[in-house]
Image (tube, rainbow, N blue to C red):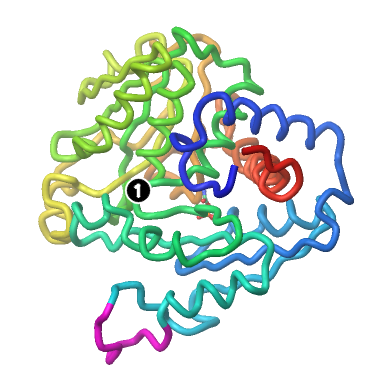
Amino acid sequence: MKNFLDLALAGPDLVAELVALAGRLQRRPEPDALRGKVLGLLFMNPSLRTLASFQSGMARLGGSSFVISPGSSWNLEYLPDIPMTGAAAEHVREAIPVLASYADALGVRAFAGGQDLAEDLSEPVFSAIEGLCSVPLINMESAVNHPCQALADWKTMDDERIPASNGRFVLSWASHPKPLPLAVPAAAAHMAAMRGMDVTVLRPKGFELPPEVMQRIDDAASRSGGSITETDDRGQAMQGAHVLYAKSWSATSVYGDAEADQDLRAGLTGWTIDSDWFENAHSESIFMHCLPVRREVVVTGDVLEGPRSRVIRQARNRMYAQMAVLHRLLVDKGD
Ligand code: CP
């Protein structure tokens, strides 16, 4: 494994190895595995979990890390060949090779622009930087992907003994005051399909996942024996569900039009996840969310702190999953 950019690129066998390695590092710490190694973390957008879990994970493996946070450094340009007369004082063509020269691996977070869906689907920042990085590159959330979250979520479901084959995974849109990126919903549904689960995307009209994202999920489901459906019928979606994974995202039907997005979501009621959502779910069903989450908007406090909630375990598994990625990239490199 040369980089960690996408679970689809890793493939199911390597993902299974990473999940197993994450479990092993959780049970049997290796405090010297990455002694002398340095991890660079470049955040073009804010973070709590990703930043803290990478730094903590690297330290637990005996390595160290440096962080470039939004506002703490120069604004970076990634578009090629444009006169840099705006806010950006530095181009990724210099910044990435410089950071890579200080580090043994480099993690980058670069959210979607949220204006042009086709552009966001093309992963413009990662497309611009991948060839510039001379050390292993890690996607810490890009325009339409969040493989570190997806790997941790896979481990969480394994830990909880959620079935893969015939396991029912519901990704539900949820209320939120703002349009949010597609990265987590796209990555979560793809991960569950890759794991072999029957995936249902539950969302209001106007919030359909883009066809390109659905196609990726469908391809993963075809290979794993899983399935993918999309509906706005909560009762149908939740019937027998093992997992309810909540996340809000932009209105894809009016992507980039903030006013039209607000109009669409203003008319929606009943999309705050509450205990009654689980009435027809599997008796052992669990609630998942990547965090951060807005209480009493996305989900009630009763669900968030109730017996079905696994959100803290998910966040903790970010650290073990990323330790496995770092171990694989920097110790037992494989292919
Ligand atoms: N889930 C997640 O990536 O959290 P942060 O945005 O806080 O890193």
Q: Quadrant of residue 51?
A: bottom right
**The C terminus, quarter of image:** top right
Residue 105, position as x, y percentages in the image:
64, 59
Residue 64, position as x, y percentages in the image:
77, 64
**Towards the viewer: 131 or 233:** 131
Q: Residue at x 73, y 51 (%)?
A: 57
Q: Which residues are magenta?
A: 81-90
**Position above or below: 15 against 238:** below
**Position above or below: 98 against 132:** below
Q: Is 307 situated left or right of 9 in this image?
A: right
Q: Residue at x 85, y 58 (%)?
A: 35
**Towards the viewer: 4 or 57:** 4
**The N terminus, quarter of image:** top right
Residue 323, position as x, y percentages in the image:
71, 45
- Residue 322 counted in the magenta span: no
Q: Residue at x 16, y 53 (%)?
A: 255
Q: Residue at x 18, y 46 (%)?
A: 252
**Residue matched to label 1:** 144
**Towards the viewer: 190 or 278:** 190
Residues packed near mark 1 inside 10 Å, few (<14), some (14 to 19) or many (20 plus): many
- Residue 84 counted in the magenta span: yes
Amino acid type, mark 1? Val
Q: Quadrant of residue 59?
A: bottom right
**Towards the viewer: 156 or 222:** 222
